[in-house]
Image (spheres, helix red, strand yellow):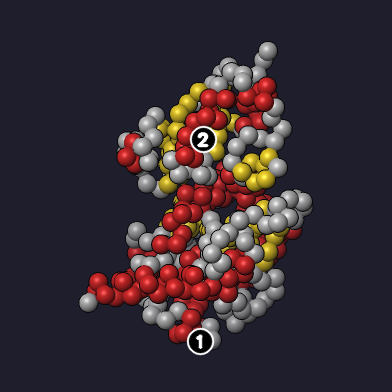
Amino acid sequence: MKTHRRIFFVLFFLTLTFFYAPQAISQTAANKFVVVLDAGHGGKDPGKHSKYGYKEKHIALDIVLQVGKMLEKNPDIKVVYTRKTDVFVDLFKRGKIANEAKADLFVSVHCNAHNSQAYGSETFVLGIHRNETNFNVAKAENEVIYLEEDYEQNYKGFDPNSPDSFIGLTLMQEEYLDQSILLASFIQENFTNKLKRKNRGVKQAGFIVLHQTIMPSVLIETGFITNKNEGAYLHSNKGKTEVSSAIKEAILNYKEAIFQKDGDFTVGTPANESKADTAEVYPNIVFKVQIAASSKALELKPYNFKGLSDVSRDKINGLYKYYYGHTSNYTKVQELQEQAKSKGYNSSFIVAFKAGQQITLEEALKSHVN
């Protein structure tokens, strides 16, 4: 009986995804990088609230509007909002907005709450919750469906209180998991290193709003409004501006890493690099191809990386990053990247290290001494 239930949920969520989502996602005709910003909750749904008078729906909206305003200063970025005012938007409609916009990223902003003085930020990607805590966070966000009209029809068979209901959620997002984790890691790194917020990590859980999208997607819990100090910080203009800036920078870092612009958005040679440069060796620089990022520590065996050998791994802020090859020859690393892409790592990109520390590709390419 349990097996039949699982098959039903898988088929249901596959049907839901294809019903509401276009079949292919690509860059827009205007060749802009499209970011959909989703302010959690709204209208009749206040989200989390605290005894200090803070409401999640207001803080999330203020942060999203600031992030959008910052991103819109970039002429090659288009920002789409799921809401810009205090209105209620169904979860499935939020994903539909992103899919119809053919977005490159979906970023949902929220605040956390607890009956203790817990604090810190965490960023979620879609996945099966590994523990009860992650399940409860997703459950609280997913229960919003009960406020929607016709929720029984739109989410037939889905019960936020049942772990079995989440089995089919991850199927359509698996293709984007590594990219989602990469963005989530950038966000957490900025919160931790720049804002000195407690890092609660990059996590996986079954959020319906992330399931509805067919592009890299994250859900940010910016902090706990039930914590006296963190709630006041998130409610303040200073806190909202700093959090917004950290999210904006993470999105730009992701865009630079994944979509190096060279006429069209592709992973490859930076636009300002000449072919003469690529034939040169860069002393004291080590180039690698980042092929994946994951919360899992995979054994460095070819069968775990589609046949690729010479794979290395670093753990950065709780996230494992996997690299293919290492060389000081930029032409060679481009060849390694093509090999990785031929194995299916289409979103792989080149990274550079100097004295064991990662630096930007631009810094590396400028470091050559004739």
Q: Residues within 10 Å of mark 2 (few under 14, many from 20)?
A: some
Pick the quarter of the image with the N terminus. Answer: bottom left
Q: In the figure, 329 relative to 320: above or below?
A: above
Foreground residue among 260 and 126? 260
Foreground residue among 304 and 188? 304
- Going 54% across and 21% down the picture, which residue do you hit? 328
Task: Identify the residue under disc 2.
Answer: 338
Foreground residue among 1 and 353? 1
Q: In the figure, 132 relative to 261: above or below?
A: below
Q: In the figure, 239 relative to 55: above or below?
A: above
Distance, label 2 to label 1, CA atoms, is 48 Å
Q: Amino acid at mark 2?
A: Glu
* Furthest residue toward top: 370
Contact? badges 2 and 1 (CB < 8 Å):
no
- Using the image, tell me which numbered label, if any, was put on residue 300: none
Pick the quarter of the image with the C terminus. Answer: top right
**Secondary structure under the numbered disc 1 in the rendered image:** loop
Q: Is 31 placed left or right of 152 in the picture?
A: right
- Going 70% across and 60% down the picture, which residue do you hit? 79
Q: Residue 133 at x, y = what percent?
A: 38, 63
Q: Residues within 10 Å of mark 1 (few under 14, many from 20)?
A: few
**Secondary structure under the numbered disc 2 in the rendered image:** helix
Q: Residue 227 at x, y = what percent?
A: 53, 63
